[in-house]
Amino acid sequence: MLFEAPGEFTLAQQRRIWALMEAARDRGDVQELIPGVTNLMLIFSTPPERPQNVADWLRHAWGTLPERHIQGRLFEVGVRYGGPLGEDLAHVAAHTGLSPSDVISIHHAGEYTVCALGSAPGFGYLHGLDPRIATPRKAVPSLKMLAGTVTIGGMQAGISALTGPNGWNSIGFAELALFDPQRDPPALFSIGDRIRFYPESIEL
Amino acid sequence: MITVLESAALNTVQDLGRFGYRQLGVGTSGAMDPLALQVGNILLDNRPGDAGIEIQTYPFVIRFESAGSFSVTGVDAVLDLDGHPVLPWSVEHATAGQVLTVGPPRRGARAYICVAGGVDVPMVLGSRSTQLRGGFGGLSGRPLEAGDVLKIAGGPALSGYGALPPAVALSRPCDGGEGNVVTLRAIPATDYHLFTSPARDRFWQAEWRITPQSDRVGYRLKGEPLTLQRPVELRSYGIVPGIVQVPPAGEPIVQMADANTAGGYPRIAGIIEADLWRLAQARIGTRIRFAQCDHHQGVAAMRPITSYLDDLRMMVDLYRGSARRRAPHASGTKP
């Protein structure tokens, strides 16, 4: 069952999703939860007899639970901006009407929050992109974008977790392993973690 | 031990899936046809979570380096054990050095080789399934290749009994008479009402064809495009196998076992869990049709599957029990 929050994609709405997630985890019938961007999917161990009861419970919990503030860790991530691994920097600059160096300074001026993990193992959906550098996904995805590529996809920012096809715009590269099944926990980021980027090098 | 002598692309080690890590972005993977894998494991008295080999490209050839009982389920195919034909959906015994060839199926798409005691690869995050995208699980996180060696746990040497294939035991009225059209029951999903009324009608009435761009991640269907009332930009949401998404081009994609955990295309429907194995066994080019059902019908549809597996478990217990009594000192028999 999927719960979708009304309204805009704000950190406040996402914090209410986190609160809902914690409350849903305590239900005896939930096997897994997938928090999304202002939504939450519940996967049941056995399908609910009356889905309406779960829907009522979700609505009530959404209406009464306070925002869940997670004091996440702060990651400072060095980025090699531009160059062949950030080849869409020029496209982002052209789309936004800014110079490439302005795009870079706006990108690392902000602080980003991990809203949810998903899509690929360890990939974090980041909130906090400055709207001035928001750039729609590419019409033709890159076929082999490297894991660790620093990206912009619409209003969302990210660091790609796996090497492979990717439709987001690459603006740089960070030396990070976002997922390692042998590590505990396997994902580098957790929900609520904050990320600050800083330029390690800039190649225009 | 078994050695892979010949394997084409994308044959992997799979169990029933990796659960509990979706919130880290790790999809479940697991057998595309979990029913066939369960039948094989029940026949061999394995644990439900034991891993087998999922074959989707043929021929696939292995050599048993040590003796072991095995069962090939999922398809109706020509199976050859050292020049002798053996039957799918039944338990056979291979002696050390024997070679098993699984030929292309006459019916079905995905075969499962189950071995007594299961295929022993390391558990990664609670499962032996191959996570192709993440590159872990199964055998080194990749498809099998000629020369690969797999450990098998082994077990008592029993053979000569089998199961009625699910396609026969669980045949439905809609499965006959319409040629090769596979009917899948589905429930309208979150974004159903964002589609135009003709698109909604056509989704249920039209025949869709499985395209060659279909794999363990998803099945792309061909047909007249489905249109939205107006374009939408959705925020990323959780995905499970069975969800039918419609990308901007309008042709549906059904999410399968290797689906990502999150996506963003509009969802028109969700295929019920009880019918997903039928899609997993439908080959490229197969025509499919969707039949609308509701939550309660979807839940009830699991009951015949559960009782089919329960009956099989009981039958296998009885058979193995009496076989043990008849041959109490046979080598390799459990005490």
Image (cartoon, coloured by chain):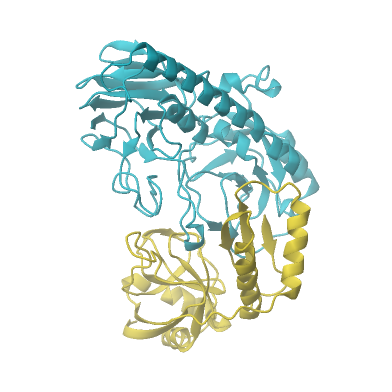
Chain colours: A yellow, B cyan
Q: Position of residue A115 (x, y in %)?
A: 54, 72
A181 up-or-down from B186: above or below? below
Q: Position of residue A52 (x, y in %)?
A: 78, 54
Q: Quadrant of the N terminus of chain B?
A: top left
B13 up-or-down from B58: above or below? below
Q: Nearer the viewer, residue B60 or B214?
A: B60
Residue pictured at 59% horizontal, 33% vertical: B209
Residue pictured at 20% horizontal, 22% vertical: B96
> In the picture provided, is A76 more to the left or to the right than A24?
left
Look at the image and tell me whether residue A9 can be seen: no
Q: Nearer the viewer, residue B256 or B164?
A: B164
Look at the image and tell me whether residue A16 can be seen: yes
Residue pictured at 47% horizontal, 62% vertical: B24
> In the picture provided, is B295 more to the left or to the right than B261?
right
B218 up-or-down from B234: above or below? above
Quarter where residue B242 is shown = top right
Q: Nearer the viewer, residue B138 or A96?
A: B138
Residue pictured at 32% horizontal, 41% vertical: B143
Quarter where residue B103 is shown = top left
Q: Position of residue B48 (x, y in %)?
A: 46, 36
The single residue placed furthest to the right in the displayed view is: B197
Q: Position of residue B259 (x, y in %)?
A: 50, 49
Q: Quadrant of the C terminus of chain B?
A: top left
